[in-house]
Amino acid sequence: MDIDITCIEALEYLDDSIDGRLDPSLKSALDAHLSKCRPCRTEKSLSLGARASVRRHMKRVAIPPAVRSNILDSIRPAAATSRPSTGLAGLLGISGWRIPLAFGGALAIALIALFVVNNKPGHSHASPADGSVVHEALNHFDEVLDGRLKPDIRSDNPLVVQKYLEERLHFPVRMAPMRQFNLVGANLTTADNETTANLIYERDGQIVFMSQYDARRLLHGTHRYIPEPVLRALKASGMYTSTGKLVDCTMAMWLIDSTLCTAIADIKQDQLLANITETDTR
Amino acid sequence: MDLQKNKEFEQEAVPHMDILYNYALRMTSSPDDAADLVQETFLKAFRFWDKYEKGTNIRAWLFRILKNSFINKYRKETKEPETVDYNDIQNFYNTIKADWADANDLQDKIFGGLLEDDVARALETLPEEFRTVVILCDIEGLSYEEIAEFVDCPIGTVRSRLHRGRKILRDMLLDYARRHGFVDGPGD
Ligand SMILES: [Zn+2]
């Protein structure tokens, strides 16, 4: 004697039955119900029909050979040149890495990414908050420019600002002393449970906005990430040339140990670089 | 050492390129985007090959990398879901239920005329977490257990998402069929 089931139960079991995952006693109860209930039979028929239609039209295809060989090519040279290394460079699998990491007390800095553009007023950096640190930094820069993102601490003393930030962060902040710009202050922003340190420098109404991230956290599959082209560029040449998304500002990204620094300003590329690299020689 | 890594990677990861590509293609509906996603996935996988725990499900590991990349790229760009008028669907549906008896005939009549575009469009409008399980189960033919590992969820969650996802998909396909006029009433 079969168990009696209701239409609601029958509908609940229908998918399991189609997938062959229904316990045999329930299966015979379902079949018994279907044999005497037309609406449920129709339901089953519609489910099967929809699924068959999906299968019929969504056939498996092979990956195009060009894409496949492209991928294989991009893996092979990397394998041939990678060598054991330490720190973030090792983590990234970067070899032939022209970008010096910090050593001794000196801040050794080089560019990872460089987006260059004309210096002109008016901003439209707004990008979706998609987890890309590039978009995030640009959005924050916009917010600083129009006054929505203000410093939580105001001080031109790098030591005071550094202390304030490091008490609230789990990674070291790198205070880049800039020759031409004055430190205004700093604040912290949080996204995806990760905190970012933001430093604001100013001169004559021009802002240099700097963000610092724990790069290790950006590489571990959380929502936030360093965009793939930037990482790829690191591996290939240490330099990334943008395909032209930025229209009116200059952006630079570089690493000091595992702290990822981003600087954005509405000044010319060489001017920004002069300020950043200035910190090299101090 | 490096050659060893390369060899391992090619033996273990590379054979899964096709299934990842298919999944990416169904998720994005764009061969270019799918190619980019798979490329990004394999570069990441290669870079993090040390992090892959040997002997565990490599396909699931690759899949999770791809899924994260997909979410990073597309989460904010997903289109507004097409609006389905559920009253229309409900009426249509009730008509079918009340008046159509021959199940096999019904399937053909309703779904037989749908085009690949209809199905792709319907899939595309499914919310991401439903789309993923429907693609993996109904197109790729994976088991609930493997899907659970892929999406890092309990099997019960996979099951309920799958049931719900199929139902939404079916309603959308029914709606297309209705709009195409494949079924204009019982008995014709
Ligand atoms: Zn029933």
Image (cartoon, grey):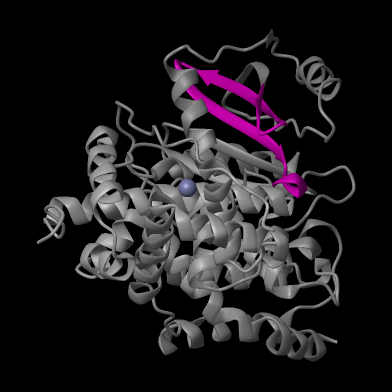
Above-or-below relation of B179 to B120 = above
Task: Give the residue furthest to the front.
Answer: A1
Q: Nearer the viewer, residue A36 or B185?
A: A36
**Within the magenta stretch, is there residue A191?**
yes
| On-image quarter of the N terminus of chain A | bottom right
Task: Looking at the picture, tell me which residue is in the foreground, A239 or B181.
Answer: B181
Q: Which residue is pictured at 67% across the width and 64% down the height? A: A21
User: Magenta region's main secondary structure?
Assistant: strand
**Residue A263 in view:** yes
Where's residue B158, x and y in %?
A: 64, 53
Q: Is residue A220 visible?
A: no
Quadrant for residue B92, please give it: top left
A147 displayed left or right of A163: left
Q: Which residues are magenta?
A: A189-218
Q: Is residue B16 a member of the stretch shown in magenta?
A: no
Residue A77 left/right relative to B26 = right
- Give the percent coordinates (x, y) of residue B19: 54, 77
Residue A225 falls left or right of residue A269: right
